[in-house]
Amino acid sequence: MYLPLGASTGESSISNANLFSRIVAMIGGAAILMRRWGKDTDQPVLGTEPVIPEASPQGIPTLKMPTAQGWAEGDKPKAADGLQVNMFAGDLIHPRWIHVLPNDDVLVAEAMPDTGPVKSAFDYAIVSTMKRAAALGVSANRITRFRDTNGDGVGDERNTFLENQNKPFGMALVNDTFYVGNTDGVVAFPYSEGDTRINGEGRKLVDFKPGGHWTRSLIASEDGKKLYAGVGSQSNIAEVGMEAEEGRAAIYELDLESGTSRIFASGLRNPVGVAWEPNTNALWTVVNERDGLGDEVPPDYLTSVQEGGFYGWPYCYWHQTVDDRVPQNPEMVAKSIDPDYALGGHTASLGLCWMPAGTLPGFDTDGMVIGQHGSWNRSTLSGYKVVFVPFADGKPNGPPRDILSGFLAPDEKVSYGRPVGVAIGPNNSLLVADDVGNVIWRVTGAD
């Protein structure tokens, strides 16, 4: 199930990239040892009242990415007590996102970024490292459909649902229209109930700038009149200029009746998963925060999204803490809203879905499920698991709990998998996209 890297390059360039990435890893390892010297490893910053360490800007940014290995035959992630996990679907190409149709068909978006412009030695270091981790390559650019025809928890019927897209990610179905969040915009396709493939022409609703943080999540409002789309920043801290970031680092609202769109909330460096909290009808998202300030500075986060709200990027982060690396705008800092819940530094929290109480045994409160893709820029790796954040009265209420773990080798040298999208599946199951294992995992109660 391991996806070979560099499918569009020659063997010599692959070898060079691998060699360079290992040299970078050695340099990064030395930098990590220096940073750890005489200090304890930073503990994950979690919860509603996070105490965030002082920033330590890094001249040589931490680069620590495990090599993508994939799962050995018969191996799988570790499920929490009372749960079990099985492979729902395999032999995919970088599965990132999941959408479950009303008839319980499971749609999987297969996409990945390609190598962008390399302008510096650090860019090349990142590209080389990402290739070794199976995070860059040739994108499948398709959505695949699975159906469990006999109820055994395996998607035994499979076909291409939609192809020839531009890095498809988010999906939404509203009445007779199927929406896809491609990296360059949202496209609408005609759909009829029970369709197993889309062949009609798409109609583009809005254009987004491609590149950078490339994923475009989607969610529809309950009344089906609006779509919300997450659009990440081009860069880490707007180092290529704010003009390049215009219209990015935001959640968009698309009015499906009028065809208009607007920025609903901004200052969100990379808002990926989006979900509704059904008791308050509030929109929530998980956001990947900036790099280069330390292992836990600042933490990624889960937050409700206020209409017109500004969440700090790139000028500041939690508690209106100014990022001195960025040309400042005091007016924007003053209006910055603190997120609701810290998820730890560099966990790469991407997947998000609401899980009602009792969906899985032992999870007796409502809450959010989060797919944590895992760090590549932390001296001790973080993430690489699926967690549950309990809610009460419409807000996070308590520490996160593991649902799936074991995606990372104990010595942190290889990853067997990396969780991304999460979705509630048929028959009280949780589905998890694993883009290194090239698998969709299914979590249920243990027999």
Image (tube, rainbow, N blue to C red):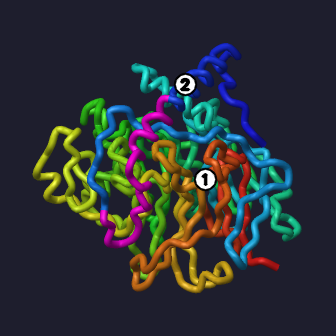
Q: Nearer the viewer, mark 1 or mark 2?
A: 2
How far is the residue under mark 1 from the one under mark 2? 33 Å
Amino acid on which disc 2 is placed = Ile
Q: Is 258 one of the magenta-colored residues?
A: no
- Of residues 223 and 403, the one drawn nearer to the viewer in this rendering: 403
Give the residue drawn at x 68%, y 68%. Answer: 425
In the rendered image, residue 108, in percent from the top left (x then y), is placed at: 67, 52
In the rendered image, residue 174, in percent from the top left (x then y), is placed at: 55, 62
> On the rendered image, what quadrant is the C terminus found in?
bottom right
User: Which of disc 2 and disc 1 is earlier in sequence?
Assistant: 2
SS of the residue at dot 2?
A: helix
Q: Is residue 429 above or below residue 265?
A: below
Please, which residue is most extreme toward the left here? 330
In the rendered image, residue 84, in percent from the top left (x then y), is placed at: 76, 71
Amino acid on which disc 1 is placed = Trp
Q: Which quadrant would residue 396 be assigned to in this image?
A: bottom left
Instruction: Give the magenta part as a residue range.
Output: 27-51
Density class for disc 2 (Cα within 10 Å; few <14, some 14-19, many ≥20) is some
The label number, if any, that marks residue 297 in the structure image: none
Name the residue beneath numbered marker 1.
97
SS of the residue at dot 1?
A: strand
Please, which residue is most extreme toward the right here? 150
Q: Is residue 72 above or below residue 22?
A: below
Q: Is residue 424 above or below residue 270?
A: below
Q: Is residue 92 left or right of residue 9?
A: right
Q: So how many labels did they put on this image? A: 2
Q: Is residue 144 left or right of residue 171?
A: right
- Of residues 406 and 253, the one drawn nearer to the viewer in this rendering: 406
Name the residue beneath numbered marker 2.
23
Q: Is residue 229 visible?
A: no
